[in-house]
Image (tube, helix red, strand yellow):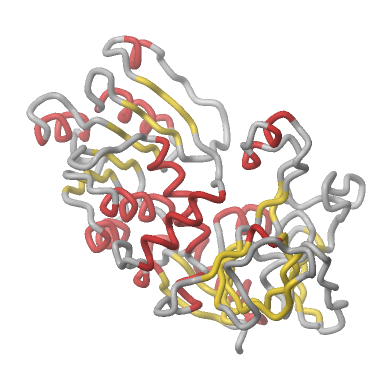
Amino acid sequence: MRALRYHGAEDLRVEHDVPEPKCGEDQIKVKPAFVGICGTDLHEYYTPTFIPSKEAPHPVTGESMPVVIGHEFSGTVIKIGSKVTNKNVKVGDKVAVQPTVACFECGACQDGFINCCDKAGFVGLSGGGGGLSDAVCVGGDFVFKLPDHIDLDVGALVEPLAVAWHAVDASQVAEGDDALVLGAGPIGLGVIQCLKARGARYIIVAEVAKERQNFAKHFGATHIFDPRHEDVVAKAKELTGGRGPQIALDCAGVAASIKTACLAVRAQGRVVNVAIWEKEVPFHPNNLVFGEKKYSAVLGYQKKDYQAVIEALGKNTMKPEAMITSRIAIDRVVEDGFMPLINQKEKHVKILVDLSK
């Protein structure tokens, strides 16, 4: 079968003789349709971190590079294993796939937090196949039927939207709450949509890039500020009667954003870290202490987040189609996908690989 495999840094190859995976008894076989390119994919292209090396195969999949990539994907069910207990999907259904790889044995897994597994990985990064192929087999519980009116290209957005939903859920946002979002990249834009779907009143966004500001406005931001030229803390407090928003979600992951988030929220407010950090940054705990503010962190998603996003799509309380800024062919992933996202990231949110091409 055809697949795009990662052989090493800056070495992606479309191959046409990759063995097609056999569907296990507890697996569902999916024909991928659309695959989103993620910031993690861009990082891995230059510096493999999650993709296992030949010297250190992944502890769950047992695989090492070359591996098929692509972890944000939708597709069509083509086979269901005999012992699959998921009765919500059938052959021919349009589905979104949760690409979680977990050991199901460590303490985190036993406690129900498979997103925090000690040996965590992702289909499309850690072995076990990937979305950028003609077929992939995944655990039966990680396949979710899409509503009939949701197209497969939108289905490929469920994975990043589930990251955002998980973060917003952790913020404990209530209808009528005010929220500050730091950063309007793909996940930040997802957070904005989830906040809107959950009934937030003011969705205040701090973002420096003009195009991303425009995307933020389209998806529901009520107020947008450029932190280079405006005092975001002061503006957020002014909008909320001097108190500050109940919650702040840091999707930017820079020293200035975490400080802004902690200073902006009101007494007893909640700050949620959504970003993955490249390095340590200075942090003053008194920014939380003075006000008894709470800081928490989130990682990835759980099954309930996928279900919630798909339910919101079904009810049309989330309409993420405009996140798709380009569709490309599998043999142009680097040229038409990775490079524009690296060199023109302000102009793009999600570039999808269309596997029908």
Q: Quadrant of the N terminus?
A: bottom right
Residue 94's quadrant in the figure?
bottom right
**Quarter where residue 5 is shown:** bottom right
- State the residue at coordinates (60%, 53%): 40
Residue ID at (75%, 68%): 137
In-front residue for pair 242/13: 242
Tell me what residue is drawn at x 24 percent, y 63 percent.
218
Query: Observer-nearest residue: 68 or 114?
Result: 114
In the displayed structure, 74 sits above or below 267; it is below
Give x and y (percent) for residue 228.
Answer: 26, 40
Relative to 259, residue 52 above or below: below
**Residue furthest out toward the right:** 55
At which x and y percent is residue 104? 75, 41
Q: Give coordinates of residue 148: x percent, y percent.
A: 44, 79
Foreground of the two, 286 or 120 = 120
Please give left or right for residue 339 compared with residue 256 in the image: right
Is residue 21 shown left or right of residue 99?
Answer: right
The answer to whether residue 315 is left or right of residue 245 is: right
> As drawn, is 102 to the left or to the right of 191?
right
Q: Is residue 168 above or below residue 330?
A: above
Number of marks = 0
Task: Confirm whether residue 307 shows in the render.
Answer: yes
